Image (cartoon, rainbow, N blue to C red):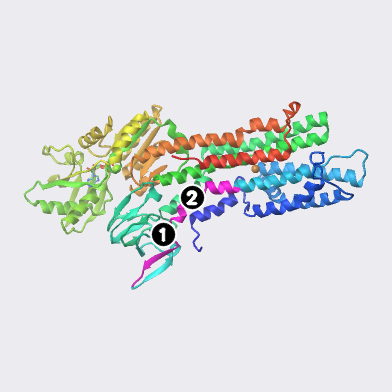
Amino acid sequence: MQMKNASQQAMSDHKMMMHGGQMMQMGNLKQKFWWSFILALPILLLSPAMGFNLPVQFSFPGSDWLVVIFATILFWYGGEIFLRGAYAELKQKKPEMMTLISLGIVTAYLYSLYAFIQNNLLHSQMKVMDFFWELATLILIMLLGHWIEMTSVMKASSSVHDLAKLLPDKVHVQTINQIEEIKINDVQKQATIIVKPGESIPLDGIIISGSSTADESLVTGEARQITKQKGQRVIGGSINGSGTLTIKVTQTANSGFLASVNKLVQSSQADKSKLQTKADQVSGWLFYAALIIGLLALIVWTSFQGITNGLERMVTVLVIACPHALGLAIPLVNAKSTALGAKHGLLIRNHNAISLSSQINYLLLDKTGTLTQGMFQVRHYASLTNKLDSNQVLTIMASLEQDSTHPLAQSILHYAQSKKINLLPLTNSQNMTGAGVSGTIEQHTYQLVNEKAARKQVSNFPKLAADKDTISYLIQDSQLLGYIAVGDQIKASAFTLIKQIKERQITPVMLTGDNQKVADNIALQLGIDQVYAELLPQDKEKVVKKLQSAGNKVMMVGDGINDAPSLVKADIGVAIGTGTDVAVDSADVILVNSEPEAIISFLDLAQKTQTKTIQNLWWGAGYNIIALPLAAGILTPWGLVLPPAVGAILMSLSTVIVAINAEFLKI
Ligand SMILES: Nc1ncnc2c1ncn2[C@@H]1O[C@H](COP(=O)(O)OP(=O)(O)OP(=O)(O)O)[C@@H](O)[C@H]1O
Ligand SMILES: [Cu+]
Ligand SMILES: [Mg+2]
């Protein structure tokens, strides 16, 4: 396959990433294991196990020589991965797992070599026991263990892989007079592409002709067919229904939705949360703990039972303490959690949001575009002057909105378009934050602003009785020329959100730039008791700060430019996916499908992720509380002695458990 997109890159990076980020090519582990197995066979047959001859074992004059030759080859060939890893760790002055393993096998090898020289070259009276059998089994099991680990780690990150499979290799691109098949990575922005019925939509874009349905469930987690028409956005990775669509590409394969999910999943492994930093510290301590306990075991057992037993205890301690699982405990959970979130319409950019989520007791919600759809219907508009008729007023108002990205502007423009109104050229257009817009049309300067701003300028402001609709006033030189009233609809899932948030003892608060009456009306319908209206961006931020200084943990959800400062300030900032880029960039979590209900999924996911993380820390490191003393021989008086190979099995098991546990994260 030609395509090598972000996610496949992630997979191959992953192989390199094992062992705490060291560059280690573990890809040939399987091969290495089988060759080592063959090399180990003569040793396993010819060298006594733990000082005793097993029934299958035999020896003949000179067989010791065979053992030492095979063991030496095995040590360098099979042990190479570990020795190289240790060298890299020591060079970085961060001794960790590879150093531990290497210390174990180097000790076993050197001591056995010493035993061999004593027995076969110096012919010492007392036969010195060697560790060749232990060395061979240790290397074999370490290789096998790391190979199995690799497989489970790959499995755990396969959810990421699934996302990549959603994209086709080739795209039908419409060129001047023909349709060409072009590799997905070579398709540029602005290209026109054709998606036939049933095909997967390759890239993010906007429909320029055709209509169909799309199944976006694999991307957003919403299992339903969404009707898609001219002008609507499509997401790369979703499946086209029965119509043919012509799409203008808005994002390339490297910048589109799937690519950003993949990048997130990758960076979730690189991006260190506070917990991860802690885990790294622990794994550093573990090295010294293992070294000290190992040396203690060596000294104590040597004085009781001689150097062979002492060395065996030390090797077992070193091997069992290998904090391999610890290095994977958090990244694996995070990767799984990010992938799972993506399937539920959540992009988690900052993993600290997960550990903070359980402390959240205030949910601040922006109104327009967050709780409501932000697709305003024009209810009525009128002229308040005899110089202009209502159509002229509408023309000026729509023309003023041409450069604005506010949802209200989009809606007014849309309405004007449907009434076939020709817009007038606009100059000097200015965005008046939290109030409206101003600009010059045909040498006259106009403002289209909310009531608060209008009252300040117009002396005899009329009384207008409308509480449900948002009204904007057209003003020229302190003269009221007309108004337009628009109404918005509450998103269905906003009701579910507020209900469930309250069940979780989290207080919902509405923060809006819109006027008090409209805000109260919506809050009442939704069941929100605390409402702050007519806020400027800095006022929204102040509310966040005030709540925080009273000791609360605050989550803020918003979509607009006016929400960006408070999204940054809040403990967890959540942006609506269709929101403005500033909001999206300021957030820790992004709701891809723009449904506020996904916040509940986030809270669920965060809680489960947190539990898994803690479990994994125990399986990855906590088990040493029992394993280390066991390896050191604390239960020897009761007959329980762990051979080094069993130590290696236990340490590998811990990693496999950590990987499987992460894989079982579900919401
Ligand atoms: N482009 C615009 N055209 C007309 N009126 C506008 C425009 N931008 C803002 N306004 C007026 O200013 C008010 C405040 O706008 P702001 O963007 O601060 O908040 P909002 O989008 O209404 O609400 P929220 O904060 O809940 O998203 C709007 O309710 C509207 O009356
Ligand atoms: Cu390990
Ligand atoms: Mg808004």
The image position of residue 289, as x and y in percent, is: 68, 33
As drawn, which residue projects farthest toward the left? 386
Looking at the rendered structure, which numbered label has been put on residue 440?
Answer: none
SS state under label 1: loop
| 466 relative to 305 in the view: left or right | left
Q: Name the residue under label 2.
A: 160
Q: Mark 1 points at which residue?
A: 252
Quadrant assignment, res 277: top right
Tag 2: Cα neighbours inside 10 Å, few (<14), some, or many (≥20)? many
The image position of residue 353, as x and y in percent, is: 45, 38
Q: Quadrant of the C terminus?
A: top left
Quarter of the rendered image showing ligand 1: top left
Q: Residue at x 89, y 44 (%)?
A: 119
**Does the magenta segment cover residue 591?**
no
Quadrant assignment, res 399: bottom left
**Does the magenta segment cover residue 165?**
yes
Q: Viewer-proximal residue, 486 or 103?
A: 103
User: Does the numbered disc 1 mark a residue whose Cβ is under 8 Å from ligand 3?
Assistant: no
Is residue 213 at all visible to an observer of this figure?
A: yes
The image position of residue 266, as x and y in percent, is: 50, 49
| 11 relative to 75 in the view: left or right | left
The image position of residue 474, as x and y in percent, is: 16, 47
Residue range highlighted in magenta: 150-176
For badge 2, the amino acid type reads: Val
For badge 1, the amino acid type reads: Thr
Foreground tag (1 vs 2): 2
Q: Viewer-proximal residue, 123 or 198?
A: 198
Tag 1: Cα neighbours inside 10 Å, few (<14), some, or many (≥20)? many
Tell me: residue 246, above or below residue 413: below
